Image: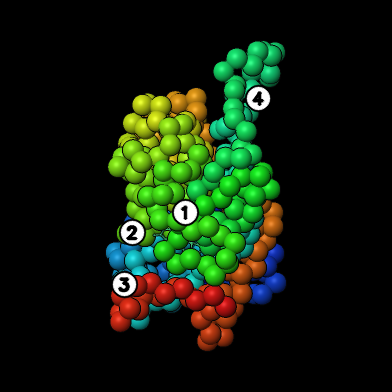
C-alpha cells in the first residue's frame, strides 16, 4: 500500500515510520496541507493520510478520485473538515475514533488551572526575579459549578477530573449517556448556573457558535470558558466583546476559529494579519495553546497504531472505523471497530 501523508510534522514521522516499515506501507511525507491545490501530489498513491487542518472539501475529493486515490485516512478523531456528501460512494473515509481522551481532558484542566491561578503570568514574573503576587488572585475550584457541553469520551473524563477537585458538575448533551450519576440540564440552565464552561462536543451545524453573544448574556459574571474541541464552537468576536465587558472572567483555548492558517506553524517573525487572534492573545486572562490537547506520547502511539490498522484493513478489503454520509438518515454516521 502507498500512502501520501499531508501536513506532516517531525513528530508524525517518529511514530509512523517504524510502524509503516514494519507493515510494508510505502509512505511519502508532504509538509503541505491537503487542499484543492495540493491534492495532485497524491497521484500514484492508494490513500492520503490527513490531519485536523487539511481541507477535504468537494474540490479536493474530486481531484483525489480522478487520480485514483481510494481512501482518506484521518489521523484524528474530529472530521468536520471533510465533505462526506462529496465522498459518498466514491472514496472511503476512516479515522481514529479514540486514542487518548485523557490527554485532551487533562489539557483542558491545565488550561482551566492556568487561567484561574494565572500561572502563565507568575512564570514570567519569577523568571524576571519579580516576586510580586499582585494581580494573580484566583478562586477555589472546590465547590464551584462546572458545566460540561458534550459528555462523550473526553467530556466524561473531564467531569471525573472536576469531581476530583470537589466541583459540582452539570452537563448538556442531546444524546445523554445512561450514566445516572450525570446531572443533565437544559443548555440555558447550564449557561446560567456554571462558573466554568468546558466544551467537549463535536463541531456540527448545531454546535457552530454555541458560545455566541446571546448565550454569553445568559452566563454568570466572571465565567471561565475552556475550549479544547473545535474553534468554531465559539464566535470569536462575541468572546472578545464578553472579555472586554468583563462578563467573561477568562478563557483557556486550545483551538481557534481560524486556526488552520496559523496553528502548528512558527509565525514568531511574521506580522500575523488575523486581528481577532491577536486581540485574543492580548488579553491577560486568555491562555491559548495551538491545538496540542492530543499531544502526549500515549496518544501519538495510539494514533499511529490505529491509523496503520485502518490502512491495512482497507488493503485487505475491510473498511474499519469508517465515517460516511447516510442519505436516508441525512447525517454522518460513525463506525467504531
Ligand atoms: P465523542 O464523540 O466521544 O463525544 C462527543 C459528545 O458530544 C457526544 O456525547 C455527543 O452526543 C455530544 N454532542 C453531539 N452534539 C452535541 C450538541 N449539539 N451539544 C452538546 N453535545 C453534543 O467525542 P470525544 O472523543 O469526546 O471528542 C470531543 C471533541 O474533542 C471532538 O469532537 C474533537 O472536536 C475534540 N478533540 C480535540 C482534540 C485536541 O487536540 N484539542 C483531540 C481530540 C478531539
How many C-alpha atoms fall within 10 Å of the one at disc 1: few (<14), some, or many (≥20)?
A: many
Between 309 and 326, the one lying in front of the other is: 326
Is 174 situated above or below 165? below
What residue is at 69 percent from the left and 14 percent from the top?
A: 131
For residue 149, the mark is: 1
Mark 4 is surrounded, within 10 Å at the Cα level, by few (under 14), some (14 to 19) or many (20 or more) other residues, namely few
- What is the spatial separation of the Cα atoms under label 3 and label 1, in whole angstroms? 27 Å
Q: Nearer the viewer, mark 4 or mark 1?
A: 1
Decide which of 18, 308 is in the foreground and name it. 308
Residue shown at 29% from the left, 64% from the top: 59
Q: Position of residue 306 (x, y in %)?
A: 61, 69
- Judging by the rendered image, the residue that carries numbered circle 4 is 123
Query: Which mark is first along the chain, 4 or 2?
Result: 4
The residue tagged 3 is 85
**Contact flag, marks 1 and 2 (Cβ < 8 Å):** no
In this view, the mark in front (3 or 1): 1
Closer to us: 229 or 159:
159
What residue lies at 33% left-to-right and 38% top-to-bottom?
A: 217
The response on whether ligand 1 sits within 8 Å of label 2 is yes
Say left or right for 307 vs 245: right
Mark 4–mark 1 distance (CA, rounded to whole Å): 31 Å
- How far across and how far down the image is residue 35, in percent? 37, 58
| Mark closer to the chain start, 3 or 2 | 3
Q: Is mark 1 within 8 Å of ligand 1?
A: yes
Residue 24 position in % (x across, y down): 64, 74
Give the class, few, some or many, for how many residues have Cα within 10 Å of label 2's Cα (few <14, many ≥20): few
Q: In the image, is 285 to the left or to the right of 213? A: right
Q: Position of residue 36 (x, y in %)?
A: 33, 59
Outermost residue to the bottom: 317
Amino acid at each position: 500500500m502507498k500512502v501520501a501523508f499531508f501536513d506532516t510534522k517531525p513528530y508524525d514521522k517518529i511514530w509512523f515510520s517504524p510502524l509503516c516499515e514494519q507493515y510494508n506501507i510505502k509512505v511519502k511525507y508532504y509538509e503541505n496541507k491537503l487542499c484543492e491545490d495540493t491534492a495532485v501530489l497524491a497521484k500514484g498513491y492508494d490513500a492520503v493520510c490527513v490531519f485536523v487542518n487539511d481541507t477535504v472539501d468537494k474540490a479536493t475529493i474530486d481531484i483525489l478520485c480522478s487520480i485514483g486515490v481510494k481512501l482518506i485516512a484521518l489521523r484524528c478523531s474530529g472530521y468536520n473538515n471533510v465533505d462526506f456528501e462529496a465522498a459518498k460512494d466514491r472514496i472511503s473515509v476512516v479515522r481514529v475514533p479514540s486514542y487518548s481522551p485523557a490527554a485532551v481532558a487533562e489539557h483542558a484542566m491545565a488550561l482551566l488551572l492556568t487561567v484561574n491561578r494565572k500561572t502563565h503570568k507568575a512564570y514570567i514574573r519569577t523568571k524576571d526575579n519579580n516576586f510580586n503576587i499582585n494581580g494573580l488572585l484566583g478562586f477555589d475550584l472546590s465547590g464551584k459549578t462546572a458545566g460540561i457541553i458534550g459528555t462523550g469520551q473526553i467530556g466524561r473524563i473531564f467531569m471525573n477530573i472536576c469531581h476530583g477537585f470537589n466541583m459540582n458538575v452539570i452537563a448538556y448533551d442531546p444524546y445523554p449517556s445512561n450514566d445516572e450519576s450525570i446531572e443533565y440540564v437544559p443548555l440555558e440552565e447550564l449557561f446560567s448556573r456554571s462558573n466554568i464552561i468546558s466544551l467537549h462536543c463535536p463541531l456540527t451545524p448545531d454546535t457552530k457558535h454555541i458560545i455566541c453573544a446571546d448565550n454569553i448574556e445568559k452566563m454568570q459574571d466572571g465565567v471561565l470558558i475552556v475550549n479544547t474541541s473545535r474553534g468554531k464552537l465559539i464566535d470569536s468576536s462575541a468572546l472578545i466583546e464578553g472579555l472586554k465587558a468583563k462578563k467573561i472572567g477568562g478563557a483557556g483555548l486550545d483551538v481557534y476559529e481560524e486556526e488552520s492558517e496559523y496553528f502548528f506553524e512558527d509565525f514568531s517573525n511574521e506580522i500575523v494579519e488575523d486581528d481577532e487572534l491577536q486581540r485574543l492573545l492580548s488579553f491577560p486572562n486568555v491562555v491559548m495553546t495551538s491545538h496540542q490537547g492530543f499531544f502526549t506520547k500515549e496518544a501519538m502511539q495510539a494514533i499511529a497504531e490505529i491509523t496503520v490498522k485502518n490502512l491495512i484493513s482497507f488493503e485487505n478489503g475491510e473498511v474499519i472505523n469508517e465515517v460516511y454520509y447516510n442519505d436516508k438518515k441525512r447525517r454522518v454516521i460513525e463506525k467504531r471497530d
